Image: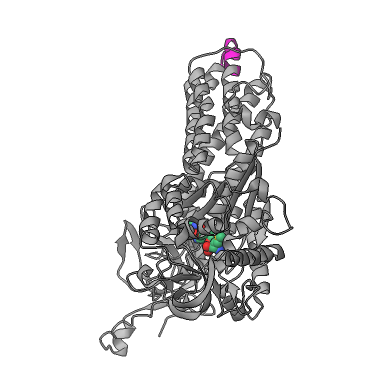
Amino acid sequence: MTKKPYYITTPIYYPSGNPHIGHCYTTTACDTIARYRRMQGYDVIFLTGTDEHGQKIEQKAAEAGVTPKEYVDEIVKVFQSLWKRMNISYDRYIRTTDDYHVETVQKIFRMLYDKGYIYKGEYKGKYCTPCESFWTESQLDENGCCPECHRAVIEAKEEAYFMKMSPFADRIEALLTQTDYLQPKTRAVELVNNFIRPGLEDLCVSRTSFTWGIPVDFDEGHVVYVWVDALSNYISALGYVNDAYQDFDEYWPADLHMVAKDIMRFHAITWPAILMALDLPLPKHLAVHGWITFNGQKMSKSLGNVVDPFLLADRYGADAVRYHILREMALGADSSFSNEVMIQRINSDLANGLGNLVSRTVAMVDKYFGGTLIEERQPGEFDAELVAAAEGLKPRLEELLEKTQLNVMLSEIFQVVSRANKYIDETMPWILARDPENRARLATVLYHLLEMIRMITVPLSAFMPETMLKVWEQIGATAAETAYETTAQFGVLPANVTVHKGEILFPRIDTEKEIDELNQLILASQPEQTPEEPAYKLQPLAEEITIKDFAKTDLRVAKVTACEKVKKSKKLLRLELDDGMGGRQVVSGIAPWYTPEDLIGKKILLVANLKPAKLCGVESNGMICAADLPNGDVRVIFPDEALPVGAKVR
Ligand code: MSP
């Protein structure tokens, strides 16, 4: 039997800077779907790649003093190594600088021209350089800026080719409102009201003011507009009007394009219009998700709020990061990234939930049966309900997959994980183990648990591929026993299955310690924001004093010998100091900016004759000198290390 083709794509990314966790969402989501579809028996082509032309890249390369191609070559390597690190199983990687793609785009441009959809005119309008988008006056935001990124737009005027859009307006409106193309469909309203109803404007499809693009082969000086170039990747990668691949007839139309909301318009309007003009079938679905935000803003390099996915994958493993981002993002809404929530989820769902279920089950088979179950069985209470919960999973997951609701799929799977953990509490195997009479019942309970783990981990392997292989090794499941069809069948593992105790799947994380470390690392990895740093607000000069007045303040060099956080306080650190006078304890409100490790062994400046006071119930004998940064952060004053402990400031 020939397999059914399935074609899924991510957007192709701009290699204008290194990838961040926001870029990982679509790619990880598509990877999960691609893996799931392969398990279901589809012949999948999963495409990703990079969108390498355009003015922004040209500018960045010039700033770096290299050619645009040299510039993108370096960043493409980083993207590809990230996808490797995240176990992204793409089948094809397209670069818009690849020859076959250039050939396809040039041919498409000519075909549209020959068919009379493209004509030459003069473009006058607003252009957003970072987004590489033209906007009409009415589309600009309330400040007259780009409606997508809200940065300033420039007046652009140049000879240009245009594509007629009005012939496609009615068909596009019907596509968006009357078919299942858009997921979620609720997004159709904004597209229809903002772009289609006011009258679809013709699209400017060539530029002459820069050269880093695909040349229009019949009119020197024009390069193809980046979005026409970029969108065409979805068909050039299959071999449409090029000889690099021969998959177009079999795999087009795409089953699923997945994108974030900021590029929905191009995929919901521009792309269908191009395909209609070429007389090609339209993709089956366009799934649009929100952004991963950080402190309420879209994560982006220029905002200095990017979370480095390499760092997260190295600390927690690619699967934990994949799980977290897929679990948090509901299709259609934004998802706020938070280290706290990520660690809580890893601890609660992965370490305590799934990890615990596997390690407890395997440990009990090991302890009570020497690793190999006996074949005798004795059914009992709770068994049937548990099996029903796992058997019901497959059809439910398939229904959710059709709607690209990956977060709900995970939540359904983890409900069964909880149900299985509850079954352990209900059946209490450790009590059964006390009486040899109960051996058959004990074996039945443990077999049910092993089967639950197997049935849950088959679909989960699309989400967390690395870990599920380890689980199958531990529960003694073979490849045939973890085939997709078996996910709704109870009783697939042999009755006398042998388990293999293995490593802990998800070690529990010490939340507080981890958050401190992570925040420091993330801060350290942000690009310097010097131009945007707030200016320091100078404090008014204090009242004049005499040297005698100053001499009343006894400022001394002291050394931090020990330091810890004050319990019940987020701000306070308790420091033990060597002050050259027998030592003392000081409490200081610098915990948001320093960890105890930052301070131990360091010399500081101490106000040594300050009246003792109690802070949060802890006595403080003096004060540590510090000053404010312009952004309100605090820095301790560290004196020259050569100054001896006890030295007096004069
Ligand atoms: N090159 C275009 C896409 C052309 S597709 C024919 C582009 N590239 S991009 O690198 O800027 O963005 C690629 C995708 O990543 C877009 O869907 C974009 O919305 C998504 N994301 C970038 N930052 C994101 C978040 N913080 N959160 C979620 N997705 C985000 O657009």
Residue 612, position as x, y percentages in the image: 31, 66
Q: Is residue 263 magenta?
A: no
Front position in the image: 399 or 111: 111
Q: Is residue 32 above or below residue 21?
A: above
Residue 299, position as x, y percentages in the image: 47, 62
| Residue projecting furthest to the top | 437
- Side (left or right) of 423 relative to 112: left
What residue range appears in magenta? 434-443
Q: Is residue 440 magenta?
A: yes
Q: Quadrant of residue 138?
A: bottom left
Residue 551, position as x, y percentages in the image: 33, 84
**Residue 467 seen in the figure:** no
| Residue lying at 68% horizontally and 37% vertically, measured from the top left | 3
Front position in the image: 297 or 318: 297
Q: Is residue 431 above or below residue 311?
A: above
Instruction: Look at the image and tell me in which quarter the N terminus lies.
Output: top right
Q: Is residue 586 above or below residue 505?
A: below
| Residue lying at 44% horizontally and 62% vertically, measured from the top left | 166
Q: Quadrant of residue 314?
A: bottom right
Magenta stretch: helix, strand or loop mostly: helix
Front position in the image: 181 or 640: 181
